[in-house]
Image (cartoon, rainbow, N blue to C red):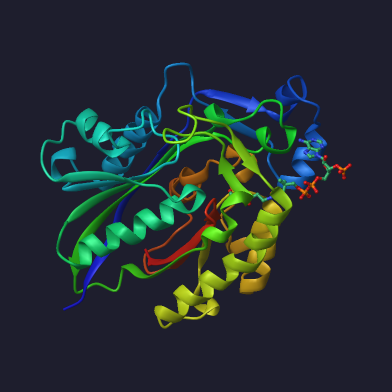
């Protein structure tokens, strides 16, 4: 019988501080109108001083466990997707493991920037179908406000902080679960979106640098492509898709990808207006917000797709 990674629970956490576009107008040379028109973003959350990526991740994990009706002791693996870890090491996943009081199993981080959650889900799926883990917490958590260049209006207005989490469980004899994944990266484009510091180069954390227009161009081309590839692998087509849960970077990218996939916007989960771009946290945040609203019904097919620094991009097809 086929062993599948089934989504048993989902949850999220957003820091209390909400930063409206109007507040950014007082900090940099920008306007609410520009940010809304070019990106669809209206507000974002910023973590409080001393509030760490692992705190956001742990809160999201607790919400997902509650939603799954599971205790932390039932988890045997934790995969955290993040590019903004508390410290260079250990992995945020092990910090979360410690905060949840879990002393068995294993925990590690995945770093694929904005595509991180898709990469983490694909890794968790591989662990489950190969029998190496039974219940996996997959978390996307970021504090991108900490790597913004506040002198660069082209990037600092776009990003936010938050975390989302999913509990995946190994189940046999079910139609539900992860049906296919598709992962890609192409390092020749590494200079389009990067952070200009790091342990081995500058010994500083650095700030985000992006050639927005170029990334936009790749996103529009590659997101629909990866979604089609994953659907093909699952033996499905876009007409079988009930919901697209895209990376929330830019409403124009979300719209154009939906159009290329031939999926109406009424079947696309959009939270970019409230969260901004939260990198690896954006898909699980969107998933959790939609789940809370009762958007998804059992048996429905979801496609999650994302692209980010690397470039790295990919998608996951999942039946609820
Ligand atoms: O999550 C990882 C993946 N990342 C993405 O998917 C991001 C992809 N890129 C984008 O979302 C868009 O390219 C942006 C939202 C970053 C920018 O939108 P755009 O339509 O590509 O604008 P642009 O960069 O071409 O800038 C247009 C104008 C420029 O002025 P000029 O040269 O036309 O006079 C900019 O200087 O807008 C100006 N501008 C701003 N104006 C007010 C740039 N940033 C701002 C700003 N406020 N914050």
Position of residue 237 measured from the top left corner of the image (x, y, whole percent) = 51, 81
Q: Is residue 124 left or right of residue 226?
A: left
Vertical arrangement, residue 302 with respect to residue 238, above or below? above
Report the residue at 71% width, 31% height from top.
152
Splitting the image into four quadrants, where does ligand 1 fall?
top right
Q: Which quarter shows the C terminus?
A: bottom left
Where's residue 101, x and y in %? 16, 31
| 236 horizontally vs 9: left or right | right
On the picture, is 259 further left or further right than 82?
right
Q: Is residue 246 visible?
A: no
On the image, the x and y values in percent for residue 162 come to 47, 35
From this viewpoint, which residue is outermost toward the left? Answer: 104
Query: Which quarter of the figure has residue 157?
Result: top right
User: Which image quadrant is residue 194 in?
Assistant: top right
Taking the image as drawn, is residue 200 in sight?
Answer: yes
Residues 177 and 153: in front is 153
Give x and y (percent) for residue 311.
54, 57
Image vertical order of residue 76 relative to residue 225, above or below = above
- Does residue 209 appear left or right of residue 8 in this picture? right
* Residue drawn 20% across the image and 30% down it: 98
């Amino acid at each position: 019988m086929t062993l599948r990674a089934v989504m048993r629970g989902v949850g999220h956490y957003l820091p209390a501080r909400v930063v409206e576009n109007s507040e950014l107008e007082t900090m940099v040379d920008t306007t609410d109108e520009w940010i809304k028109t070019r990106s669809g973003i209206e507000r974002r959350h910023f973590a409080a001083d001393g509030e760490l990526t692992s705190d956001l991740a742990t809160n999201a994990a607790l919400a997902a466990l509650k939603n799954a009706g599971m205790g932390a002791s039932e988890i045997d693996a934790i995969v955290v997707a993040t590019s903004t870890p508390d410290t260079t090491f250990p992995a945020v996943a092990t910090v979360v493991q410690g905060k949840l009081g879990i002393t068995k199993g294993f925990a590690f981080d995945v770093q694929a920037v904005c595509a991180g959650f898709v990469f983490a889900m694909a890794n968790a799926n591989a662990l489950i179908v190969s029998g190496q883990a039974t219940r996996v917490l997959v978390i996307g958590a970021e504090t991108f406000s900490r790597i913004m260049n506040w002198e660069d209006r082209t990037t600092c207005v776009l990003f936010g902080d938050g975390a989302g989490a999913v509990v995946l469980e190994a189940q046999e004899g079910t139609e539900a679960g992860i049906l296919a994944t598709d992962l890609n990266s192409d390092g020749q484009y590494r200079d389009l979106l990067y952070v200009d510091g790091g342990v081995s180069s500058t010994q500083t954390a650095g700030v985000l640098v992006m050639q927005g227009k170029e990334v936009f161009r790749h996103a529009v081309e590659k997101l629909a492509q990866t979604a089609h590839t994953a659907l093909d692998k699952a033996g499905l087509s876009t007409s079988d898709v009930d919901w697209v849960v895209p990376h929330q970077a830019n409403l124009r990218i979300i719209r154009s990808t939906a159009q290329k996939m031939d999926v109406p916007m009424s079947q696309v989960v959009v939270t970019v207006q409230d969260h901004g771009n939260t990198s690896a946290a954006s898909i699980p945040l969107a998933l959790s917000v939609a789940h809370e609203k009762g958007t998804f019904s059992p048996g429905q097919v979801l496609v999650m797709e994302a692209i980010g620094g690397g470039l790295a991009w990919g998608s996951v097809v999942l039946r609820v």
